Amino acid sequence: MIPTSDQRFTFSLIVELKRCAMVRFGFRVPSLRKRISARTSLKRYVRNNLGLKAPRGWGWLTNPRKAAYNRFYNRTTRGCLVVLAIWGALVLAGVTLAAVLAR
């Protein structure tokens, strides 16, 4: 049976809703490969050299759906370096892990 256009639209809508619902919580896992590829992509090079970038904070204008996802993602996750920074501060202050866990 060949799906009708209404069935295809409904299916694509369900897939899109499931994809949007897959927002992470907790700590982000660092990836050196993704960090390097984001800085050295051809798309980034062209956009920066041609001046096609929107000002900071205008993501809601250029791509509102992506801006909403990123806003939620950045508020519900933390980078792994935050934990290391807190631990480093405790070490510098002379606080032991046992003392922190005992509180």
Image: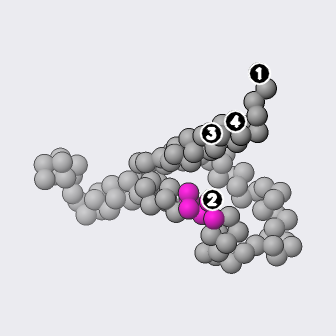
Element type at mark 3:
helix
Q: Which is nearer the N-term, disc 3 or disc 4?
A: 4
Label 2 element class = helix
Mark number, residue 7? 4
Sequence-wise first label, 4 or 1: 1
Which mark is drawn over residue 15?
3
Q: What's the CA distance linking mark 3 and mark 4?
A: 12 Å
Q: CA distance from mark 1 to mark 2?
A: 35 Å
Is residue 85 depicted above or below 11 in this figure?
below
Amino acid tagged 4: Gln
Which residue carries the number 2 mark?
Answer: 66
Whether the magenta-drawn stretch holds residue 67 is answered as yes
Residue 42 visible in this rendered orientation of the protein: yes
- Circle 1 is placed at which residue position? 1
Q: Amino acid at mark 2?
A: Lys
Q: Nearer the viewer, mark 1 or mark 3?
A: 1
Nearest-to-viewer mark from 3 and 4? 4
Q: Which stretch did the figure color magenta?
A: 64-70
Q: Main secondary structure of the magenta part?
A: helix
Tell which of 72 and 80 is nearer to you. 72
Q: What is the distance, in whole Å, between disc 2 and disc 3 at their CAs?
A: 16 Å
Q: Horizontal placement of 21 versus 63: left or right?
A: left
